[in-house]
Image (cartoon, coloured by chain):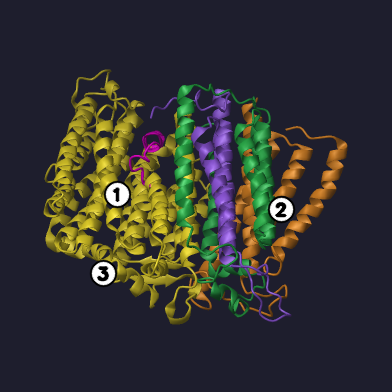
Chain colours: A green, B yellow, C orange, D purple
């Protein structure tokens, strides 16, 4: 399990690096698709079919939206001149990232390794869930019953984004324009 | 369980949705519904404040409690600290909304504006009430996503750029917070804050603890715009429509930034000396650098935005000192003073910074410019704006008898009692610098020779003037909180929640 | 926005119907099989997006559609909140209580209010995604004039 | 543990992109990549060896299921990610129509 996911993650990292360095914006967007769809496979391997369905649909829609934005633009990214300051910046970034990585390595040392998770708060979401919520799908049970308030917030966020997009994309901001 | 608690979120949500549905059909529907909603919320908050009386209440969403009252679903927590925040949010919200009634008339898509305004209030109420880490994250996103849209509401060039910058840094902060929540779940197997505290009391690895704290400080530091995480604030707060600037500077950075930071570090983590030092140092740095950056600004709203960073620094520094003093354990009176001063300054800052942004909005409304060099001589033609902004400026620079003087005094006394002489000296120094740049603002906007003809400029319309006068009265009235017997009833419940941090988890788990 | 060729139109007509039905199925079986309101709603929105891309539409029609989708999502999410508030008065007297009878686990009509939430959230998500997409398309149409 | 570290590498790649890229679209892509890495970390945390997908089989006895709570949290976070991306794209396309470029070095009215 760990090996398979590591391999997919390797591809995702390569895709991510390509997405950041691609010259053409359309290929960058599509390379992001690699990362997103790689995530779908990981979800399936990790026994999360609900997430796989949602991620595959949301990823597709994100790609459609991003392609719609990028498609008739110039698409060419302008060259970043690579001089001494950017070299220094990159080096500093790498040193900081190495430090962060080392820090993270130490932080997660004592935590449960993959697959050895024990249920805490979620124990009652699994045991006796059928009597509590009546939902066979435990994730739906958590989403719409135990933590339905979170789901309301989530729906409100999507609603806000739709309202915000509608507001930001109107033609005139002020009546006098 | 008090059935009114979820209404703080449900009520503004319902009006937000109704405004979108009926806003286009019924003329003036949103202008009527939005103030009523905020007024009802304010009354509800004041009612809860009076009925709570220093106790804390928990509300289990969906009635999900496990055996012996252990949290199973999401818990909403209403205690002395959160109820004060609710009062501030809904008060400033109501005033800013009333001000918008005439200020926003020149913009299109007004129904969307009022709807987004209700959503931002709902999000902040949700954050303040939440006792669950993930739920807190969700409602934080509700409020910040609506604020992204509101910052860019005018869809001009600067608004859009400011909003983009705000969104990128806000998104980064959200990622850090989400990662921290994931790691906490990994270690503690729960996302309920009271239970996390109980789990942290046992054994934990030092590196993990520090890593999570660094993530949370940077995440919420970005939301609260503490230096060095402040890059987005001057742009976003100066480009937004003025009532929204008042909301963002007055309450949003407090509700989703400082309040959460304080709540997490007092009630969820176990104190460590290092974290106290880090928080106090970040506060002091923001306080000094924010005021220094503000001096050179000629754009009114940018000046106010930098001064927000500086004042936020005061609040954060006070709480940092509180942590150190509580850990020392030998000087609880000073700790009470520091924490009380922090909360007091938080209330005061919401009021006078809200008022100052509304003043700046009035200037922009009549003059169509934010540049101080193009103003001048307005004290005759806009007497109300001039007087109220003078009061607010004196208040923020700490001149008696206004409220800002007392809260700064309390913080400085706490610093001296706790033997933080350097911090006390810095606080006094920054107060003098603040006076300097606000005198500059007063002089160039209202008292200098007029640059262009100002005879034709009239005072702002009634709703805007009323909002400003109301906040100016509050600037004086809030000085009463400095009287010990008044602060004993108003601020004491909030202080109690913070100085006995372990009570949060012990009282809430056994409901 | 211009439509595509006849072949694309015919095929997408057929496929969009199937996708739409699949989305509805996912929403209705949210408490039984993987999926639910979010996944199903996004799939339904995908069917509409496919039709709009294939057939094209004038800016005027798009504006009518966006008003419709925006109103639909508002009503749907309003119903979610009202359903949550209803349990303050019925059943357990708490916000977001599951006040309907649970039924027999594993059947379509079970789990109390969960299927209702699934349906409303599904409509809301479909409406929201469609609104975002249409807002982008309308903006591109109008600003390129 | 190696999977978690790889996830963190993906996170750092996204962070690197947010800091160094100068293109509106690429910044949005970098934020999405950071999101993906956190989703994967959360789901990995909830995985249990030999655990089944969290769909109860009513006919059989009790089984071990993977933790449904991180999955519910990730589902919420995916939708939040869609919302933030949509808002970013709305602003990006507006800025593009005003400046004819996605490059933030040429879109600079505001000073630090």
Secondary structure under the numbered disc 3 in the rendered image: loop
Would you place residue B40 above or below residue B147 in this image? Answer: below
The residue located at (12%, 58%) in the rendering is: B483
Mark 3, Cα crowd under 10 Å, few <14 / some 14-19 / many 20+, is many
Q: Position of residue C13 (x, y in %)?
A: 83, 46
Q: Which residue is mark 2?
A: C43
Instruction: Tell me if I can see residue B97 in this picture.
Output: no
Task: Answer with left or right where residue B265 lies relative to residue D14.
Answer: left
The residue located at (29%, 48%) in the rendering is B350
Could you say which quadrant of the image residue D49 lies in?
bottom right
Above-or-below relation of B82 to B258: below
At label 1, counting other C-alpha atoms closer than 10 Å, the crowd grade (few under 14, some 14-19, many 20 or more) is some
Q: Which residues are magenta?
A: B224-241
Q: Is residue C100 left or right of residue B200?
A: right
Q: CA distance from mark 2 to mark 1?
A: 48 Å
What secondary structure is found at the residue carrying circle 2? helix
Distance Cα–Cα, label 3 vs label 2: 50 Å
Q: Front-most of A142 and B109?
A: A142
Residue B436 among those drawn in magenta:
no
SS under mark 1: helix
Dot 2: chain letter: C
Residue beneath label 3, please?
A: B54
Q: Is residue B236 above or below residue B481?
A: above
Which numbered circle lies on residue B278? 1
In this image, B286 relative to C89: left or right? Answer: left
Q: Position of residue B57 (x, y in %)?
A: 35, 71
Quadrant of the rendering where the N terminus of chain B is positioned:
bottom left
Name the chain under label 1. B
Q: Residue at x 74, y 41 (%)?
A: C52
Residue B286 visible in image: yes
């Amino acid at each position: 399990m760990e090996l398979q996911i590591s391999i997919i993650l390797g591809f995702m990292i390569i895709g991510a690096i390509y997405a950041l360095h691609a010259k053409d914006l359309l290929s960058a967007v599509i390379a992001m698709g690699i990362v997103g769809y790689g995530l779908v496979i990981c979800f399936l391997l990790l026994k999360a079919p609900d997430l796989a369905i949602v991620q595959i649909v949301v990823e597709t829609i994100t790609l459609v939206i991003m392609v719609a934005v990028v498609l008739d633009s110039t698409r060419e990214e302008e060259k970043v001149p690579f001089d001494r300051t950017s070299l220094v910046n990159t080096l500093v970034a790498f040193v900081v990232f190495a430090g962060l990585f080392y820090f993270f390595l130490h932080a997660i040392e004592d935590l449960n390794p993959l697959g050895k998770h024990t249920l805490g708060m979620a124990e009652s979401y699994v045991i006796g869930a059928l009597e509590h919520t009546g939902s066979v799908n435990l994730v739906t049970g958590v989403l719409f019953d135990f933590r339905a308030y979170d789901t309301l917030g989530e729906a409100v966020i999507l609603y806000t984004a739709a309202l915000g997009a509608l507001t930001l994309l109107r033609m005139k901001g002020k009546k006098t324009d | 369980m008090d059935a009114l608690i979820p209404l703080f979120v449900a009520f503004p949500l319902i009006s937000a949705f109704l405004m979108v549905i009926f806003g286009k059909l019924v003329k003036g529907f949103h202008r009527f519904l939005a103030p009523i909603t905020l007024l009802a919320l304010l009354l509800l908050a004041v009612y809860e404040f009076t009925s709570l009386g220093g106790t804390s209440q928990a509300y289990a969403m969906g009635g999900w409690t496990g055996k012996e009252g252990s949290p199973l679903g999401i818990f909403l927590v209403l205690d002395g600290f959160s109820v004060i925040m609710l009062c501030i949010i809904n008060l400033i919200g109501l005033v800013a909304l009333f001000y918008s009634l005439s200020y926003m008339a020149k913009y299109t898509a007004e129904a969307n504006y009022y709807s987004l305004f209700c959503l931002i209030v709902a999000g902040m109420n949700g954050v303040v009430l939440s006792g669950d880490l993930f739920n807190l994250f969700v409602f934080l996103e509700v409020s910040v996503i609506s604020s992204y849209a509101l910052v860019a509401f005018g869809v001009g060039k600067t608004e859009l750029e400011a909003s983009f910058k705000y969104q990128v840094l806000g998104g980064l902060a959200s990622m850090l917070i989400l990662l921290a929540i994931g790691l906490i779940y990994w270690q503690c197997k729960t996302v309920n804050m009271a239970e996390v505290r109980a789990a942290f009391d046992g054994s934990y690895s030092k590196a993990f603890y520090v890593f999570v704290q660094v993530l949370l400080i940077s995440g919420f530091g970005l939301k609260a715009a503490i230096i060095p995480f402040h890059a987005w604030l001057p742009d976003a707060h100066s480009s937004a429509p003025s009532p929204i600037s008042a909301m963002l500077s007055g309450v949003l950075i407090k509700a989703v930034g400082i309040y959460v930071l304080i709540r997490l570090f007092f009630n969820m983590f176990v104190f460590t000396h290092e974290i106290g030092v880090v928080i106090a140092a970040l506060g002091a740095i923001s306080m000094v650098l924010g005021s220094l950056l503000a001096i050179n600004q000629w754009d009114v709203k940018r000046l106010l935005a930098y001064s927000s960073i500086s004042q936020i620094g005061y609040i954060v520094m006070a709480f940092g000192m509180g942590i150190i003093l509580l850990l020392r354990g030998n000087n609880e009176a000073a700790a009470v003073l520091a924490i009380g001063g922090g909360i007091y300054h938080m209330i005061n800052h919401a009021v006078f910074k809200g008022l100052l942004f509304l003043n700046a909005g009035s200037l922009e409304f009549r003059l169509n410019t934010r540049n101080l060099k193009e103003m001048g001589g307005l004290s005759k033609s806009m007497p109300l704006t001039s007087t109220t902004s003078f009061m607010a400026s004196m208040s923020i620079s700490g001149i008696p008898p206004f409220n800002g003087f007392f809260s700064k005094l309390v913080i400085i006394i706490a610093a001296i009692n706790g033997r933080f002489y350097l911090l006390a000296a810095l606080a006094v120094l920054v107060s003098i610098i603040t006076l300097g740049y606000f005198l500059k603002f007063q002089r160039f906007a209202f008292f200098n020779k007029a640059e262009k003809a100002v005879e034709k400029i009239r005072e702002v319309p009634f709703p805007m003037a009323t909002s400003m006068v109301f906040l100016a009265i509050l600037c004086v009235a809030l000085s009463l909180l400095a009287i010990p017997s008044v602060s004993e009833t108003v601020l004491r419940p909030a202080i109690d929640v913070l100085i006995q941090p372990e009570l949060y988890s012990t009282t809430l788990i056994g409901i | 926005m211009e439509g595509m060729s006849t072949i694309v139109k015919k095929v997408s007509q057929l496929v969009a119907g199937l996708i739409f039905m699949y989305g509805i199925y996912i929403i209705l079986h949210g408490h039984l099989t993987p999926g639910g309101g979010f996944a199903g709603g996004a799939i339904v929105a995908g069917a509409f997006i496919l039709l709009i891309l294939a057939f094209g539409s004038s800016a005027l029609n798009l504006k009518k559609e966006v008003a419709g989708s925006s109103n639909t999502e508002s009503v749907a999410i309003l119903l979610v909140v009202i359903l949550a508030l209803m349990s303050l008065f019925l059943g357990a007297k708490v916000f977001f209580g599951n006040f309907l009878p649970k039924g027999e686990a594993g059947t379509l009509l079970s789990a109390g209010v969960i299927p209702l939430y699934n349906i409303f959230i599904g409509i809301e998500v479909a409406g929201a995604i469609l609104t975002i997409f249409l807002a982008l398309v309308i903006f591109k149409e109008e600003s390129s004039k | 543990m190696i999977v978690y570290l790889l996830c963190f590498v993906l996170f750092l790649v996204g962070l690197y992109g947010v800091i160094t890229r100068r293109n509106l679209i690429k910044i949005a892509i970098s934020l999405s990549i950071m999101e993906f890495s956190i989703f994967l970390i959360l789901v990995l945390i909830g995985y249990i060896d030999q655990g089944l997908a969290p769909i109860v089989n009513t006919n059989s006895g009790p089984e071990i299921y993977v933790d449904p709570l991180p999955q519910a949290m990730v589902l919420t976070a995916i939708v939040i990610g869609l919302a933030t991306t949509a808002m970013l794209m709305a602003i990006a396309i507006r800025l593009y129509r005003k400046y004819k470029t996605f490059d933030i070095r040429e879109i600079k009215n505001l000073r630090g």
